[in-house]
Image (cartoon, rainbow, N blue to C red):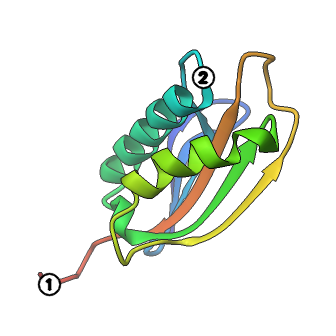
């Protein structure tokens, strides 16, 4: 079964299939890439929780930067956010994003936490 949440004509923010969660690309607000990354990852985390997952259950992340020169600043925020020992498979590249003020976009695939024991 496929579940779609926050769906409009173009996309869904969350798509669940079995125990896999797919998030649409998330961007953030802020004056620089560090601020935008923090806001973006906050949005990712909120969607993961809503979907019954968490950042500790991330399987894959794709990070798009408007400029690769922001790589170190983005990674400083990323590294502090990802739980130790739970880094997902990740790719990072440079791309022209949807708006001129956007500096980072993150796309995440995760497993749900259903059926796990602590």
Q: How many marks?
A: 2
Rounded to the nearest angstrom, the CA distance separating label 2 from label 1 is 40 Å
Position of 105 compared to 39: left or right?
right
Residue 103, located in which quarter of the rendered image?
A: top right
Q: Position of residue 49 (x, y in %)?
A: 31, 51
Q: Residue at horizontal 38%, vertical 53%? A: 80
Q: Kindly report which numbered mark, 2 or 1, lies closer to the viewer in this rendering.
A: 2
The answer to whether mark 2 and mark 1 are in CB contact below 8 A is no
Q: Residue at horizontal 46%, vertical 42%? A: 41
Q: Is residue 102 above or below residue 21?
A: above
Residue 4 in sight from this viewpoint: no
Q: Is residue 31 above or below residue 117?
A: above
Would you name the residue on which mark 1 appears? 117
- Assess disc 1: are there few (<14), some (14-19) or many (≥20) residues with their C-alpha within 10 Å of its C-alpha: few
Can you name the residue that lies furthest to the right here? 96
Position of 117 compared to 99: left or right?
left
Q: Residue at horizontal 63%, vertical 51%? A: 107
Residue 105, located in which quarter of the rendered image?
A: top right
- Assess disc 2: are there few (<14), some (14-19) or many (≥20) residues with their C-alpha within 10 Å of its C-alpha: some
Q: Is residue 102 above or below residue 92?
A: above
Q: Secondary structure at mark 2?
A: loop
Q: Position of residue 118 (x, y in %)?
A: 11, 81
Q: Secondary structure at mark 1?
A: loop
Would you name the residue on which mark 2 appears? 32
Q: Position of residue 117 (x, y in %)?
A: 14, 84
């Amino acid at each position: 079964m496929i579940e779609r949440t926050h769906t409009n004509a173009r996309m869904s923010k969350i798509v669940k299939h079995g125990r896999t969660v797919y998030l649409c690309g998330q961007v953030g607000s802020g004056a620089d890439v560090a601020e935008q990354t923090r806001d973006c990852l906050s949005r990712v985390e909120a969607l993961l929780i809503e979907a019954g997952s968490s950042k500790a259950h991330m399987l894959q992340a794709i990070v798009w930067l408007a400029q690769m020169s922001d790589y170190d600043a983005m990674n400083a925020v990323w590294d502090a956010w990802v739980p130790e020992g739970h880094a997902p498979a990740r790719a990072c590249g440079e791309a022209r994003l949807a708006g001129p003020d956007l500096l980072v976009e993150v796309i995440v695939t995760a497993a749900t936490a259903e059926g796990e024991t602590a």
